[in-house]
Amino acid sequence: MVKVDAGGGDWLALAVLAQYRMATTEQMHRVIAPGVRIEQTRRRLAKLRSEGLIDRITLPQAGRTRVWFATQYGVQVASEWPELREWPPPKLSADPTAARLRAGHALAVTETGLAFLQDARRRGDVCWPLDWIPEVYHALGGGEAVIPDALLYYRSCGDGGSMLRAFVEVDRATMGPERLAAKLGAFARLHAYVPTPIGRPRPHFGLQPLEEDWRRRYALFPRLLFVLDGTGPTGIATRIQALRAATRALAPSSFLRDVPVLAAPLTDLLRNGPSAPVWHPIHVPDQDHKVGWMQSRHP
């Protein structure tokens, strides 16, 4: 039986790696123990590795950066914890080559989550490490699904302590602007998707109408945030234009009326924090001024 420290440090480190997929040593330090020296985080990671719960690869083109991930055994252990039971971690390959090939996007998603986590710490808001949940599966029926890069839970301590949720898509400019913009339509389908139970008769007077599937999980449909990376200002502008063009195909749409859709460069999030006015409204195409992601409200 693996001995996980009662103080919770080992528990949190394994839970974060199982949920986040991948993180560098420096990212892990900022997530789990920013108030202590990084040597303590290094020792903790080495201990978990010696117990077979996590492993690492070294990226030769990034200053020999060490990147950590949970092993199959580590994922099995973590998936039994109540905190990870609702959104179970995926089964990950322990092959170092497979880990290296997915590292770029996974680390960008982790860095984006860190931007929200550190911003909450500065502001006194509530956003814990496990409130950033990558790759949450949402069925659309017929074998289709929407799997955002991350689902964010965030409680703002201002304005009455409102609970905020967001789907986050991290784009590293590895696909064309049109393919990025097509994701907007997928989220619109998720917003409208109503599953039909097998064997239920057609709705008629007296039967309770069926509801959209997302209402089983969320009080309000989460905001949709596109975080743009891997390109310069011109590329960012082109991708924002493509997203805005995609909204015209959805109009008129209750999705655009109900769900704030925003886009921002990752560099701006890291420099100013996600709560700063760095987001371009997509759901209001004629609105040019930038806003904070918490400012854009559901009606």
Image (tube, rainbow, N blue to C red):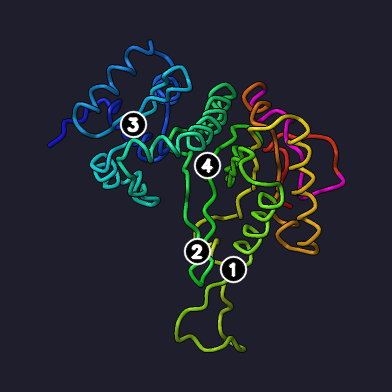
Residue 21 or residue 292, whichever sits in front: 21
* 224 to the left or right of 36: right
Report crowding for label 1: few under 14, some 14 to 19, many 20 or more residues within 10 A (C-alpha).
some
Marks 1 and 2 close (CB-CB < 8 Å) = yes
The residue to which callout 4 is attached is 153
Front: mark 3 or 2: 2
**Residue 52, image x, y percentages:** 21, 33
Q: Quadrant of residue 271?
A: top right
* Residue in view at x 46 percent, y 33 percent: 128
Q: Amino acid at mark 2?
A: Ala
Q: Quadrant of residue 42?
A: top left
User: What residue sits 42% from the left and 21% below the top?
Assistant: 65
Q: Are marks 4 and 1 in contact (CB under 8 Å)?
A: no
* 183 shown above or below 60: below
SS at mark 4 in the image: strand
Q: Which residue is denoted by mark 2 in the rendering? A: 139
Q: Earlier in the sequence, mark 3 or mark 4?
A: 3
Q: Position of residue 74 (x, y in %)?
A: 26, 39
Q: Are marks 3 and 4 in contact (CB under 8 Å)?
A: no
Q: Which residues are magenta?
A: 272-286
What residue sits right under mark 3 in the picture? 12
Residue placed under numbered mark 1 in the picture: 193
Mark 3: amino acid? Leu
Earlier along the polypeptide chain: callout 3 or callout 1? 3
The residue drawn where x is 58% and y is 47% is: 167
Q: Earlier in the sequence, mark 2 or mark 4?
A: 2
What amino acid is at disc 1?
Answer: Tyr
